[in-house]
Amino acid sequence: MRLLLTLIAFGGAFGFFHVIAIGTFGMGMGDVFEICVILYVGYYTIWLGNSLEIPQRIETYGLVAMLGIMLLSAASVVVSGNTEMGIQTSKTLAHFLYLWLFAFLAYCVPIPPETWVKVLRFQLMIALIVAVYGLYQIAARPLGWPFAWIEISNASFSRGTDDVTSSNQLALQFGGFFRATSFFSEPSALAAYSASALSLLLVPLFRGSQAIIRSRTLFWIVLVGTMLGVFIAFSITGVLLTSCCIGVCMVLYWKRAWKKLILTLGVSALIIVGADSVIHKYLAVSVVEMFTIRIGSIIAGNASGDSETAVIGESMSQRVDDYQVSYEVMKEYPFFGAGPGNFGKTLTGKQNELQFPSTTYGSVAAELGGVGFVIFLSFLLIIVIRTFLDERKWTEITGNKNEAVETLLPFITIRILFVMLIGVAGNSFVSGYFWTEVLMVLSIQSGARRAMGIERVYLMRVVKAPWRELVLKKQMGTN
């Protein structure tokens, strides 16, 4: 399992090409290894005869409720008799089912917290590579150096275009400065990835607990790298996620964190000012100044595309429009939605030439209706509240503690908050990112609850006897 989780972490940063394309769906490395996890659980339960350990808590019921509303919404499409929508629903539902099975089955197989520590340590190394390549792009793109751009050969990134085999990375140019994308399709994805990695470093720093990276030198190298990854993407998403992480840490660990905050802000200022000075010297553009203008225009309400003070390419107006269109679709299908994947098949979607909205919440509201939206939002909020309460309970424990749990538990509430914030400006519900994050958070929570002795599980045997034993008995009988 550890190898598969590590490979999924690797695939999460390199989704720019597909292993195989099924129509307009490009199956990347992460997708392949998620399916391998499902097969591994089959081996674990059927061949080895181990039981699934299904946690008896509200988060499990939330997972089942998410499956239920997807099936109910799909059933409503079948009942409607709309062939076009029915075909699209079957494709989206198939995609959702294997993602949900991957998360649920892996959640029911106890994954030691020590395994997650090693997987996340590997992910931090990948994040450093991602940041270094992004920094290379800052110089390589205006100077025309090799490998400045990556051709996105994943069909999933080309939906709605004439070419379903390849597309270019999206990176707007400001003078001589191109927003960095690293191995991702667009800058916001780089910013979100870097901010998620940065959270793994900031939380233990502010809390005063054991960091995932033990070497202090390597710790600060990765911290500087991921911080620069957020900066050079020039993305509000990255700023929002990083601010969320710091803000939550200040609320939870103020007594221990304020001194570290001063240190971190000082180091951050030096890094950002230094990087901005280099970019301004060679490319005649100040990223700090552009951030100031962009954030100021959003606060002042002048972030629309036709505003004179808006930064070129500002996406906020598009997000607002997508929410409005999503609301109109939800009014057409108020209870169970238009069905999984059917946003662009609705009359409103066609009239607005919008295949799918660039927001998770708009997509869920339109495709799963009011009922699905309430279930979805409740599911995430329950995880936030319950992981927070478990972290508080763990912090109150005195005596010997599980070191891996001590390292991991404090940051999982922040990671699920990240999922919720990314959903505001990104459509990630039926994606490997969303369900891998949900699995990681719930699995680490289970590990912590087992360590505290409060986890109750239902043991479910898939087979009466391990198939391995049956095969061995049969072979012995024939001999």
Image (cartoon, rainbow, N blue to C red):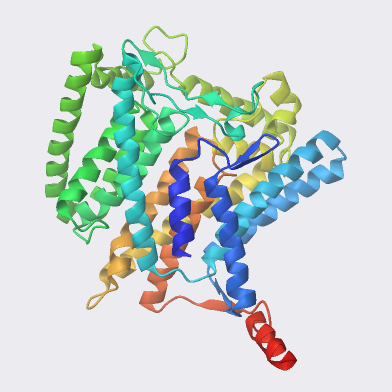
Q: Is residue 134 above or below residue 30?
A: above
| Residue depicted at x 52% and y 21% | 318
Q: Is residue 71 above or below residue 421?
A: below
The quarter holding residue 147 reads top left
Residue 137 in the image, given as x and y percentages of width and height: 33, 25
**Residue 244 visible at all:** no
Residue 229 in the image, given as x and y percentages of width and height: 31, 34
Q: Is residue 324 left or right of residue 72?
A: left
* Residue at the farthest front position: 479
User: For the image shown, how many numbered marks are present on the structure?
Assistant: 0
The quarter holding residue 339 reads top right
Residue 362 in the image, given as x and y percentages of width and height: 59, 35
Q: Is residue 374 above or below residue 478?
A: above
**Residue 453 visible at all:** yes
Q: Nearer the viewer, residue 60 or 150?
A: 150
| Residue depicted at x 31% and y 19% | 296
In which quadrant is the C terminus drawn? bottom right
| Residue depicted at x 16% and y 26% | 273
